[in-house]
Amino acid sequence: MATKTFKLGEVCKGGVITAIATKTKVTIIAKDWDTTQGYNKGSNQSNAKEWDRIEVSTSDSDADSKLNWFIYDLTTSYYTDVIMDWVKSKTELKALSRW
């Protein structure tokens, strides 16, 4: 299992996105920035309040698309690509076949 917390601040709803990737499932969690831990990117946001999440099976035929749209709703296209690149480096997602 691989976990990464992206502390994006103002360019993200809530400011924090945590991605968890396993061999069979990817979970993306949207969190509110925990200001009691500080305001800089070095602050500990592990206990930040969760307000939305998506869990997708890696065998789902449109897992890539579901994750992309969920993350894009939270942040910019640039950070969506950054997070998706990290997810793809940790697991194999199935993309919806266009033909």
Image: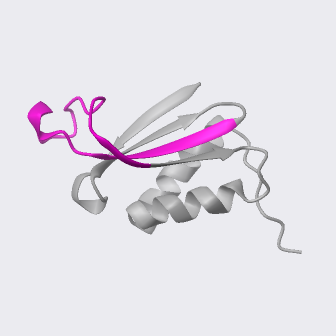
Residue 8 seen = no
Q: Where is residue 12 in the image (x, y as percent from the top left)?
A: 31, 58
Q: Is residue 20 above or below residue 94?
A: above
Q: Position of residue 90 (x, y in %)?
A: 63, 35
Residue furthest toward the top? 1
User: Which residue range is magenta in the image?
Assistant: 25-52
Q: In which quarter of the image is the C terminus?
A: bottom right
Task: Count how many numbered circles sit on residues in the image.
Answer: 0
Residue furthest toward the right? 99
Tell whether 38 sits left or right of 18.
left
Tell whether 12 sits left or right of 91.
left
Confirm whether the magenta stretch covers residue 36. yes
Q: In which quarter of the image is the N terminus?
A: top right
Tell me what residue is drawn at x 28 percent, y 40 percent: 49
Q: Where is residue 3 in the image (x, y as percent from the top left)?
A: 49, 30
Residue furthest toward the bottom? 99
Q: Position of residue 7 (x, y in %)?
A: 30, 44
Tell me what residue is drawn at x 73 percent, y 59 percent: 62
Q: In this view, does 5 lie above or below 17?
A: above
Tell me what residue is drawn at x 26 percent, y 36 percent: 48
Q: Looking at the rendering, which quadrant does residue 63 occupy?
A: bottom right
**In this view of the protein, which residue sits in the foreground, 20 or 55?**
55
Tell whether 18 sits left or right of 34.
right
Tell whether 30 sits left or right of 61.
left
